[in-house]
Amino acid sequence: MYRCIIDSGWVDVEPLTVLVGKMEAGKTSLQSLVKKWLTRYDAAEARVLTLGPVVGVTDRPFAIEDIFTDDFYTKRVWQVYSKELSAAGIKNIDLKGSDQLIARVQRELSNANISFNKGSVAKIIRRDLIAMKSANDLPAETQERAAKLIEAIVQATS
């Protein structure tokens, strides 16, 4: 059941921390965020954390999916698209390039005429994360990146 709130008024947000990934149009998106949105909070302290540098990746675009290793992510892609991949004769998802993980997956699936929906893969990842007994069930690289991300968020909001 949902409740409609009519004009709840302004909500004070202090300090404000925004976490952004570096997209292909990253600089423009970040400038737009700061110029059009964060300036509304001029009375509050506002910080922008860029995902890649926070987790130690500065040489390429980095989105939240890049927290995961290629192997971890492509296993979930296979779970979602196994019928389509098998029908296309693909036995192994071979990601090429060094751009964002989702861009490489999308390219690979597109080459097989398969439409990629990252939300479907995210649902499988969420299910698998909930089923894990601890973070130690994740690949070491994912654990390291997640720890850096959480530490940066804690520092930014403390």
Image: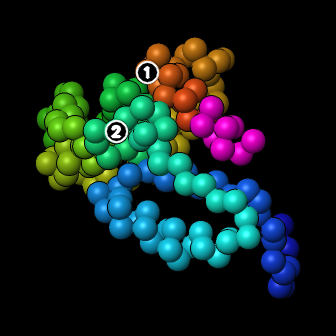
Q: Is residue 153 above or below residue 31?
A: above
Front label number (2 vs 1): 2
Q: Quadrant of the N terminus?
A: bottom right
Q: CA distance from mark 2 to mark 1?
A: 16 Å
Between 138 and 140, the one nearer to me in the picture: 140
Residue identifier under label 1: 141
Q: Position of residue 21 (x, y in %)?
A: 44, 51
Q: Answer with left or right where residue 139 lies relative to residue 42.
A: left
Between 155 and 83, the one nearer to me in the picture: 155
Residue range of the region highlighted in magenta in the rendering? 151-158
* Point 22% across, 38% down: residue: 98
Q: Answer with left or right where residue 4 lies relative to residue 92.
A: right
Q: Earlier in the sequence, mark 2 or mark 1?
A: 2
> The residue tagged with tag 2: helix, strand or loop?
loop
Residue identifier under label 2: 58
Q: Is residue 123 above or below residue 115?
A: above
Q: Is residue 77 above or below residue 142?
A: below
Mark 2 near mark 1, Cβ–Cβ under 8 Å? Answer: no
Q: Amino acid at mark 2?
A: Thr
Does residue 63 belong to the magenta stretch?
A: no
Q: Is residue 148 above or below residue 43?
A: above
Q: Amino acid at mark 1?
A: Glu
Of all residues shown, which one is farthest toward the bottom?
Answer: 7
Q: Answer with left or right where residue 9 lies relative to residue 60.
A: right
Q: Position of residue 12 (x, y in %)?
A: 81, 68
